[in-house]
Image: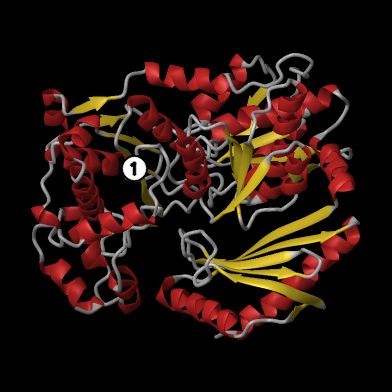
């Protein structure tokens, strides 16, 4: 059935709700919109579902959420009655339809005899992971589209370890979804009835108290740090407001200033538009408040508060944005050095990072006898290492990060955690401030000791079906026309993670290592209509490192642009 026939089938089906019917009627005659909404179904992968809100097979709506949940329920049911009794945790963020999708998921699980523990109000994504582990659930669902634009929402699936599911589970769920083509055959137990019968239950408030205690226990240095440090915080109208502020208050950081315009939930993200703190534009309001109060540090968390971005006051009073690579390097250095100083560094310690994140952490970790693991993008892969080390008693996970401003210290939450990270970044900045150093000063010290690592991530947005197809053509062209030299540097090695035997799951990533140990990687985003170019340029001085990065970028951009 082609997309036109699928659209007409939806349009003629009187079983859809009135809003869906109106939405379908509103695009009648709009060929491009119909094609975009119906040329494919949202695919259930290791990131679960993510897409624009609206009617259509390629959109996030209650029907696709119910279908995905039924596939997930079928997968859980394979574990028998014990798995059903352990139940699932459900949490949701501030986005349009998040609460509605969470309720639909709860109703489908309950109709399948699977116990549901759902949060009473908006929570950060890491709280979902924590809940699964704390309640010994068999699985979990977080309704969020993370940092995507306001038109999006999503559905993240978690395993019993509190990590996002891996390929094997995603494939099982996808197989079961195929068994439920008719949305209207999927049973749902009304939410209020589920509460009355006890198969749906609200998560007890004590769980959040335990989460806060466990984060506070991550404290490494609480004395001889400057508790007077001035911090501006913005939750960007997302889920982080209550918990981040409470954690910093309980640590006795009293000079915390919150951006009022971005304090409370706003699913339209009116003040910021694109609610991605990885983009320095998200700091516009924070910088204004920072100048007014003389803040040393600006913190921003994304809508579901699993990612944390940072700006630091420079000597001239301006604010400098720190990339995820720089924050990850600073935290690796601070955590390992502070643990070593306190004689708390675990034996066989591990730092885990995505393979497209900076290599600066490798010499830092080596200094402290800590091993670095490179994994595919996504915290599901970072914590897969933590899970394996734990199972085999082969080491202890200390810290994980990826360049897209995601980090986490310890493993009681097995996903990136901006609540924990906000506390650790503030502690780190206060520690160095007591010594008369800013985080910018510490970065320079690291570069002088280990070499200059210049990093960049270039995202090329290519939307719609045409964009998706062009991304495929770009990857095919680079894969089939291997380069021998890039910007005057000889290619030392090429790793094709889709085809080579790397010991990691197959993934559509190409990574080029150059003869000076610089590298670049090319991969399509798994959650957004983008192809991403990652560059790690190394030299013994800042100028040459940055020039090398620019040259690699220019060279690769010309190749990408040449593919129609």
Percent position (x, y) of residue 520?
68, 66
**Which image quadrant is residue 59 in?**
bottom left
Q: Which residue occupies 65% across, 31% down?
A: 347
183 shown above or below 236: below
Q: 170 or 385: which is nearer to us? A: 385
Relative placement, left or right, of 122 versus 277 is: left
Location of mark 1 (residue): 98
Instruction: Name the residue located 24 percent from the left edge and 31 percent from the top edge.
Output: 86
Instruction: From the top left corner, tell me how far across and down residue 540 is, in percent.
Output: 90, 57
Closer to the camera in the image, 50 or 452: 452
Residue 20 located left or right of residue 371 = left
Quick check: can you spot residue 556?
A: yes
Looking at the image, residue 114 sits to the left or right of residue 333; the answer is left
- Give the vertical position of 19 relative to 245 (above or below): below
Residue 85 lies in what quarter of the image? Answer: top left
Between 259 and 474, the one nearer to me in the picture? 474
Q: Secondary structure at mark 1?
A: helix
Q: Position of residue 284 (x, y in %)?
A: 67, 44
Mark 1, Cα crowd under 10 Å, few <14 / some 14-19 / many 20+, is many
Q: Is residue 531 visible?
A: no
């Amino acid at each position: 059935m082609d997309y036109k026939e699928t659209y007409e089938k939806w349009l003629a089906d009187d079983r859809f709700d009135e809003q869906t019917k109106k939405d379908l009627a509103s695009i009648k005659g709009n060929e491009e919109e119909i094609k975009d909404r119906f040329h494919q179904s949202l695919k259930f992968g290791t990131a679960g579902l993510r897409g624009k809100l609206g009617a259509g097979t390629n959109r996030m709506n209650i029907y696709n959420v119910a279908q995905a949940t039924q596939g997930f329920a079928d997968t859980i049911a394979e574990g028998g009655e014990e798995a059903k009794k352990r139940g699932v945790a459900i949490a949701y963020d501030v986005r349009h339809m998040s609460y509605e999708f969470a309720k639909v998921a709860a109703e489908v699980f309950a109709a399948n005899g699977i116990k549901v523990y759902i949060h009473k109000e908006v929570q950060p994504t890491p709280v979902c992971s924590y809940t699964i582990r704390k309640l010994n659930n068999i699985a979990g669902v977080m309704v969020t589209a993370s940092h995507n634009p306001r038109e999006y929402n999503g559905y993240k699936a978690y395993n019993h370890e509190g990590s996002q599911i891996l390929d094997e589970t995603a494939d099982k769920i996808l197989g079961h979804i195929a068994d439920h083509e008719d949305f209207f055959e999927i049973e749902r137990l009304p939410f209020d009835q589920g509460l009355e019968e006890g198969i749906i239950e609200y998560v007890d408030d004590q769980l959040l108290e335990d989460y806060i205690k466990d984060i506070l226990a991550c404290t490494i240095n609480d004395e001889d740090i400057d508790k007077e440090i001035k911090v501006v915080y913005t939750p960007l109208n997302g889920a982080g407001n209550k918990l981040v502020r409470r954690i910093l208050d309980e640590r006795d950081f009293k000079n915390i200033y919150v951006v009022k315009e971005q304090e409370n939930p706003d699913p339209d993200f009116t003040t910021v538009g694109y609610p991605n703190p990885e983009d320095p534009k998200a700091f516009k309001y924070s910088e204004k408040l920072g100048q007014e109060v003389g803040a040393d540090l600006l913190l921003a968390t994304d809508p579901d508060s699993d990612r944390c971005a940072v700006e630091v006051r420079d000597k001239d009073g301006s604010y400098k944005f720190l990339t995820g690579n720089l924050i990850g390097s600073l935290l690796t250095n601070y955590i390992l050095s502070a643990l070593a100083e306190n004689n708390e560094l675990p034996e066989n310690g591990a730092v885990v990072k995505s393979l497209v994140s900076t290599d600066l952490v490798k010499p830092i970790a080596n200094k402290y006898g800590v091993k670095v693991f490179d994994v595919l993008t996504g915290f599901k892969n970072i914590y897969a290492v933590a899970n394996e080390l734990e199972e085999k008693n082969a080491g202890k996970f200390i810290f994980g990060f990826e360049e897209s401003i995601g980090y986490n210290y310890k493993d009681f939450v097995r996903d990136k955690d901006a609540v924990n990270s906000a506390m650790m970044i503030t502690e780190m900045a206060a520690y160095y401030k007591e010594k008369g150093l800013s985080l910018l000063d510490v970065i320079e010290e690291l570069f002088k000791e280990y070499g200059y690592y210049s990093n960049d991530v270039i995202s090329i947005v290519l939307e719609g079906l045409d964009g998706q197809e062009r991304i495929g053509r770009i990857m095919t062209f680079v894969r089939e026309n291997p380069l021998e030299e890039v910007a005057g540097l000889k290619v030392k090695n090429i790793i094709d993670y889709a085809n080579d035997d790397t010991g990691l799951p197959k993934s559509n990533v190409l990574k080029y290592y150059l003869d000076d140990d610089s590298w670049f990687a090319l991969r399509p985003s798994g959650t957004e209509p983008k192809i991403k170019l990652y560059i790690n340029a190394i030299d013994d001085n800042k100028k040459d490192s940055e020039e090398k990065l620019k040259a690699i970028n220019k060279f690769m951009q010309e190749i990408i642009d040449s593919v129609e």
